[in-house]
């Protein structure tokens, strides 16, 4: 290992400068489709693990919980050298999680890479998370190639003939291409389709260490019937020597995935909203190593001995020990203490990391996932990383021993920084720490880390579902009066058109209150169904909600608008029904009467008045509680199908689709997250353990009318409020 390290230490610094011979790739897939097993084989190419252990060691699952649960929880980065057509290539690889609860890690990894190897199981085919991870990649303009894995299982278990095997492959390729056609950026739809004939699709077995592609077959003479013959007769080791998985996959990566120089030309305008003709813009588009430094942090990990390690992509310039970097857009700056490359669980220290590479940096204590670090204090930060799903489950946490409270506060800050998909808040009513995550497993793992890694004993409540609030129809105008009765605000509310909500979620409509190009934004909103005169009054975006000022010529309103925006934000983050966040609401300020003396329209007068006006209009519009749903995909043999469907229906599940491949039945259902607690053990019991299942976020839908009052009362009581929400008269003052 030391010999390999010293060889790498010599080779890599030189190779980092040859931008055309670098590939930054992510391995993405549905859970248990074999990403980490495949990554093992790719590491064997670098001599980092033995060929005998490749596929069994799961080298990149180095976290204790990953090993115990046999699933990937964190992104794992490794740098590999691969020779292709006589030239050495530097491949920075990120192995990503497949479980829906850790989808945030996939999203963040996609910002750092330019290409993705999409792994699909030959038996299960394209699954829910395959679609999700592909969407995450394509949204970041990351080009995909396809690896169809577990072909050995298709041969041994499904007993497929060469013809039926090729038909199975054709179906998977067609499904992946259909997803690419639907979700790829328009200009790349045709170029990014995968095709077995040109080698952008490979087939193989990560576990048995072999792979094949059409160009490889043409070059070596190994054919599909040979593969079936070798696998069927248990001679996998022989085929692994004739069809090396490393060569096939890495050749596909080098041939079909772009270098940073190619990718940054089209990726930078997609992920950065600064001026392309500026020095930093030009430097990033041309991947210049001599321009200003631009480093996007995509991951924070805690090393017990080294402290916080910020991993991310260098888009311009270089990172060197001792240099000072600003948190873009602020005066805050940190000094780089060490620069290194991740080699799985270890790091290789280097003198510098140049543009186009992925680096691990110690010393950036003010960085978190999504931070832009630069040598320019006024650099426009990169676009916020947009996660596909949001936290839907919460637990309340408190220390077992009150003396540990200060330590717990610090630890909660660290875990939130390490995992940007978590949300941490303190409930002012109860003093509890609330930890919100993507699902039960996500929160379980986080609690395990707090106790075992950070040594704080905690008590946690049962998981609680995160709800949202909205309205049934239009409501208002409603008058909100200030406590001194000198100021009055009149608001109307109604649901936002769904295309506008989607555009906000996709980051096409920016959050906040300052809009660089309002004219273009108004045109975009009009195209999405918002009347132009309303769009012109766009004042603030908070979550998936808009504040629109449609008043005309009201004296002193400009001076008061900042406070109205504060009230709007407060109202959208704590709705009037159950103190949950508001979703998809259009809030129109239609009139106002303001006192001429500014002393009578300060924060203590304006904020309560505007908030009451919004709340009252929501009451008139008919308040609705929304609950999160998940798409649940269950694979079971025919003989236990009824047990699985019964279990889903018992949980208010709606069966959306049922398909079969041989004896294997696939059920797709829509189930409320509130009913999913304990699902893992119950579905195993219902199917005698013969089950594979996965979930995917499906957004929020209204709680059934007959259940709403009881759910609202329960949520309000948990928050220390009286069970019944207030009526409109309460907000009229």
Image: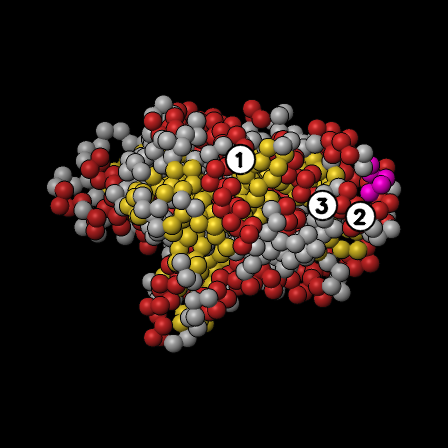
Q: Is residue 527 left or right of residue 410?
A: right
Asked whether, in this view, residue 90 is left or right of residue 633, the answer is: left
The spot of residue 570 in percent (x, y) is 33, 49
- Residue 246 in the magenta stretch? The answer is no
Which comes before the other along the chain, label 1 or label 2?
1
Whether residue 177 appears in this view of the structure is no
* Residue in front for this viewpoint, 92 or 639: 92
Q: Which mark is residue 149?
A: 3
Count of numbered badges drawn on the protein: 3
Mark 3 or mark 1: whose residue is earlier in sequence: 1
**Mark 3–mark 2 CB contact (< 8 Å):** no
Q: Nearer the viewer, residue 51 or 459?
A: 51
Q: Which residues are the magenta region?
A: 223-227
- What quarter of the picture does the N terminus occupy? bottom right
- Circle 2 sits on which residue? 238
Where's residue 517, x and y in %? 35, 27
Secondary structure beneath disc 1?
strand
Name the front one of labels 3 and 1: 1
Among the 4 quarters of the image, the one containing residue 652: bottom right
Question: Which mark is drawn over residue 259?
Answer: none
Kindly report the secondary structure that dominates the magenta region of the rendered protein: helix
- In the rendered image, residue 383, in percent from the top left (x then y), is placed at 41, 37
In the picture, measured across the screen, residue 13 lies left or right of residue 35, that is left
Circle 3 packing at 10 Å, graded few (<14), some (14-19), many (20+), is many
Q: Nearer the viewer, residue 212 or 412?
A: 212
Is disc 3 placed on a helix, strand or loop? strand
How far is mark 3 from mark 1, CA to CA?
A: 25 Å
Q: Earlier in the sequence, mark 3 or mark 2?
A: 3
Judged from the image, the secondary structure of the residue bearing numbered disc 2 is helix
According to the image, label 1 marks what residue?
22
Residue 381 placement: quadrant: top left
């Amino acid at each position: 290992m030391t010999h390999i390290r010293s060889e790498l230490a010599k080779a890599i610094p030189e190779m980092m400068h040859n931008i055309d011979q670098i590939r930054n790739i992510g391995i993405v897939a549905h859970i248990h489709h074999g990403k980490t097993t495949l990554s093992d084989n790719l590491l064997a190419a670098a001599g980092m693990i033995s060929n005998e252990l490749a596929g069994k060691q799961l080298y990149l699952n180095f976290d204790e919980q990953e090993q115990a649960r046999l699933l990937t929880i964190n992104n794992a980065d490794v740098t590999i050298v691969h020779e292709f057509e006589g030239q050495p290539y530097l491949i920075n690889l990120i192995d990503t999680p497949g479980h829906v609860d850790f989808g945030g890690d996939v999203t963040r990894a996609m910002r750092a890479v330019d290409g993705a190897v999409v792994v699909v199981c030959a038996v299960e085919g394209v699954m829910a998370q395959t679609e999700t991870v592909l969407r995450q990649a394509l949204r970041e303009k990351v080009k995909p190639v396809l690896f169809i894995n577990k072909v050995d299982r298709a041969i041994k278990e499904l007993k497929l003939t060469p013809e039926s095997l090729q038909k199975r492959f054709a179906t998977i390729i067609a499904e992946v291409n259909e997803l690419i056609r639907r979700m790829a950026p328009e200009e790349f739809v045709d170029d990014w389709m995968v095709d077995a004939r040109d080698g952008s699709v490979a087939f193989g077995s990560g576990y048995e260490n072999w792979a094949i592609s059409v160009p490889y077959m043409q070059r070596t003479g190994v054919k599909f019937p040979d593969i079936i013959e070798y696998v069927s007769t248990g001679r996998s080791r022989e085929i692994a020597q004739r069809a090396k998985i490393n060569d096939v996959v890495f050749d596909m990566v080098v041939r079909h995935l772009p270098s940073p120089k190619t990718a940054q030309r089209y990726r930078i305008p997609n992920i950065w909203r600064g001026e392309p003709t500026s020095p930093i813009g030009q430097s990033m588009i041309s991947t210049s190593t001599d321009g200003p430094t631009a480093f996007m942090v995509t991951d924070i990990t805690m090393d017990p001995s080294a402290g916080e390690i910020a991993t991310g992509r260098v888009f311009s310039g270089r990172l060197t020990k001792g240099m000072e970097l600003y948190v873009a857009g602020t005066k805050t700056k940190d000094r780089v203490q060490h620069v290194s490359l991740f080699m799985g669980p270890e790091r290789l220290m280097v003198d510098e990391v140049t543009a186009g590479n992925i680096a691990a940096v110690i010393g950036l204590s003010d960085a978190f996932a999504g931070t832009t670090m630069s040598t320019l204090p006024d650099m426009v930060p990169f676009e916020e990383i947009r996660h596909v799903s949001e936290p839907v489950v919460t637990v309340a946490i408190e220390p077992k021993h009150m003396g540990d409270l200060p330590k717990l506060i610090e630890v909660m800050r660290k875990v939130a920084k390490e995992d940007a998909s978590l949300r941490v808040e303190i409930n002012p009513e109860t003093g509890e720490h609330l930890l919100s995550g993507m699902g039960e497993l996500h929160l379980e793992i986080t609690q395990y880390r707090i106790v075992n890694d950070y040594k704080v004993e905690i008590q946690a409540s049962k998981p609680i579902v995160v709800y949202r609030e909205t309205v049934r129809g239009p409501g208002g105008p409603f008058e909100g009066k200030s406590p001194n009765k000198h100021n009055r605000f009149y608001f109307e509310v109604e649901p936002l058109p769904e295309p506008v909500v989607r555009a906000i979620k996709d980051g096409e409509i920016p959050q906040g209150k300052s809009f660089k190009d309002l004219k273009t934004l108004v045109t975009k909103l009009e195209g999405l169904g918002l009347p132009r005169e309303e769009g012109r009054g766009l004042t603030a975006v908070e979550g998936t909600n808009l504040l629109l000022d449609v008043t005309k010529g009201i004296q002193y309103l400009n001076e008061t608008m900042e406070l109205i925006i504060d009230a709007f934000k407060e109202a959208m983050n704590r709705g009037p029904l159950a103190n949950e966040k508001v979703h998809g609401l259009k809030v129109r300020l239609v009139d106002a009467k303001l006192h001429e003396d500014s002393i009578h329209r300060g924060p203590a007068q304006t904020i309560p008045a505007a908030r009451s006006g919004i709340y009252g209009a929501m009451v008139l519009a008919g308040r609705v509680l929304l609950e999160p749903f998940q798409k649940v995909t269950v694979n079971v043999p025919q003989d236990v199908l009824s047990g699985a469907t019964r279990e889903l229906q018992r949980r208010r599940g709606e069966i959306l689709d049922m398909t079969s491949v041989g004896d294997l039945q696939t059920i797709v259902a829509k189930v409320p997250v509130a009913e999913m607690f304990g699902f893992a053990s119950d579905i195993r019991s219902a199917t005698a353990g013969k089950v594979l299942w996965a979930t995917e976020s499906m957004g929020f839908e209204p709680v059934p009318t007959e259940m709403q009052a009881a759910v609202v009362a329960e949520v309000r009581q948990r928050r220390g409020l009286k069970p019944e929400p207030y009526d409109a008269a309460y907000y009229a003052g």
